[in-house]
Image: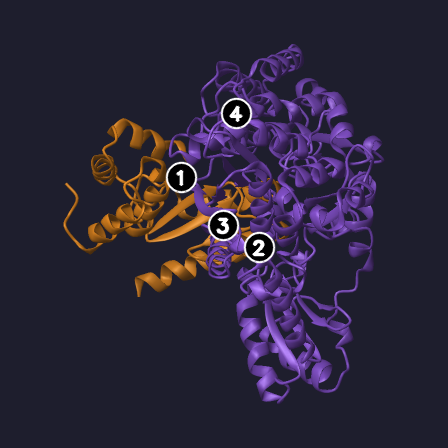
Amino acid sequence: MKAADIQKIAERELDFQRGYKYRINVCCSSGCVPFGALKVLKAFEDAVKEFGVQKECKVARTGCVGTCSVGPAVVVEPGDYLYQSVTPEKVRQIVRDHIALDLPVREQLYRNEAYFKKQQRLVLRNAGTIDPYRIEDYIAMAGYFALSKCLTAMTPKDVINEVLASGLRGRGGAGFPTGQKWNLVAAAHGAPKYIIANLDEGDPGVFANRTLAEADPHAILEGMLIAGYATGAEKGYIYIRAEYPLAIQTLKRALSQARSFGLLGESVLETSFKFDIELRFGAGAFVAGEETAILASVEGRRAMPRPRPPYPANSGLWGKPTLIQNVETLANIPLIVLNGGAWFAKIGTPKCSGTKCFSLTGKINNPGLIEVPMGITLREVVFEIGGGISDGRAFKAVLVGGPSGGCLPEALLDLPIDYDSLTRVGAIMGSGGIVVLDDQSCMVDTAKFFTDFCVDESCGRCSPCRAGLPEVKQVFDGITGGTGKAEDLATLEKSSVYIRDASLCGLGQTAPNPVITTLRYFKNEYVEHIVEKKCRAGKCFKNKRKEETS
Amino acid sequence: MLKEDNRKAMLEKAMKEYDYQESALLEILHKAQEIYGYLDKNLLTHVAKTLDLPPSHVFGVATFYNFFRLRAPGEHVVTGCFGTACYVKEVEEIVSAVEQEFNLKRGESTPDGKLSLFMTRCIGACAMAPNIIVDDEVLGKATKEMVLEKIHRALGGAAT
């Protein structure tokens, strides 16, 4: 297949799709499958036959729509009617009324315009609308157009210049400018060069990357191919958590389809560009998201970081130049190539262009997967998109950035979300976890929970992290167990700073963030625990209370 | 020595597919766990020998990653998700209730090998938190009552 053929496939597929008056998109991602999405899909396929509308109505399995708390979610096009909590029993009514009679079933619709109003879907542009198992669906949405543009009309240097102009920064958390990274790898000596797409997503409470892979796998592959062309790499690895079986299955299919379409292999789209992609499976290690640790893991070793320099751009996999990029970063690339860097730079804020996907969870009315322009405030995310606190409770804090992020109080809700603002207040962008806490949460217990997590996940290589974090944990055990002392606060503060400043990698450097931010913004709760032996949320002193009652 | 059987042949085939590459050790261990259910000493030694790696290296990798199981799980497995969203939504209360009801601790199995209770760090169904997995079924927005009933039913079904 040649570059020009892509356009023809797209036209043919669009013609085919226009042959249907209706399209029913059934979300079959990991959020909806456990709650019966596959049965719903089957029920729709049966129902369109039963009502004799299979010629005018296409039933498609798609990825995530984003309303993960009211799954299985089903969208009927045209008109984007979103049905919530669909069961096989409700399916017949939807097909009978909506498709056969053209009367949407109002009472089953998800009515929450606020949830979508402030979102802007770039990375998730195809999520929930295309069938991830069909490459033609992706191509019909201008998929692989960017790759064919690169191979026919752009030099690698042109591609890098567009990425530089876009201002795109790495979505894995650290926010390093993507174009600069590509320049480093392109300029590095050594061959072959490699690309690793990071889909390890070790943060508990985060599922954006998984959703992307399940909904639109080819966007990741196309981004990798373009990165390969721009940097001169010829081999890519997607490093994915083994805990994501559906995403793995989706990617496997996508890879084999891309290969059969001539998009991977010795001669991509019959040009001299050679590129192939292999999957590598993580096995549940938070630290493996760190870039030197991921190298060790892809090489089949324990995921333990090493000091930098040398940076992976110069000495990565097997000592060769390696580009490591989060899959969300890569999924932005086709859009930047097609629409130009200048177009992308206008979205978001001047220093942080584009959008960011967040997994929005916790004590909130509308949990789910969202994508918002950079610069949106936390308040908009929590109270407008998220619909405020559930069960009529009061807001207490929002955790941004996963287990090594920060706990921010109400006073900081008007903070715009971007890498620099978050870092300034002690949180991090991380991989995009936003967890909302209400007044039933204890901030001391929350900080302890994250410390426990980081103790478990510390790889043990450097002593500040390996030995320091358990010290912090012990202090927490004392405070929440009823034996806290006044000097504990100073100990926590001092140890946190040591661990942050002296650890080798990002895990240790950010692990104290929850401790530091809760001490900064919720010190009164620590004092209550230590002085009054009181936990206002009723989480702590449990053992002590048991003794008293027995 | 690993028993000569179908499973061993499947493992051999998988290792061959990866060309006995040292860098595919994680993939091979995943495959081994899929075939045997867990990775015991015998199995790890066999993998080390076949890939021509020091056993210490293979054991080191197997023990480093949380996903690898080194002991046989019980007949029925209950897994509590301890991701952040589930923690915030009080998964702890449900897991403690399971511990009390069936008199076992998290990470362990009952003496009769019928039930194991494990913890996992996030299954990614955070919008449905708290999540508990009973055998292969994910229970979203789980409650104590719902989980206990499910386990009782699973155990009852196994006995008859």
Give the CA distance from mark 4 to mark 3: 31 Å
Give the CA distance from mark 1 to mark 2: 38 Å
Residue in the foreground of this view, choosing between A32 and A489: A32
> Are the residues at dot 4 and dot 1 in contact (C-beta closer than 8 Å)?
no
Circle 4 is placed at which residue position?
Answer: A314
**Subunit bearing disc 2:** A
Q: Residues within 10 Å of mark 1 (few under 14, many from 20)?
A: few
Q: Nearer the viewer, mark 2 or mark 3?
A: 2
The type of residue carrying mark 1 is: Gly
Circle 2 is placed at which residue position?
Answer: A218
Q: Secondary structure at mark 4?
A: loop
The type of residue carrying mark 3 is: Tyr
Circle 3 is placed at which residue position?
Answer: A244
Q: Secondary structure at mark 2?
A: helix
Side (left or right) of A524 relative to B70: right
Q: Nearer the viewer, mark 4 or mark 2?
A: 4
Occupied quadrant, residue A158: top right
**Subunit bearing disc 4:** A
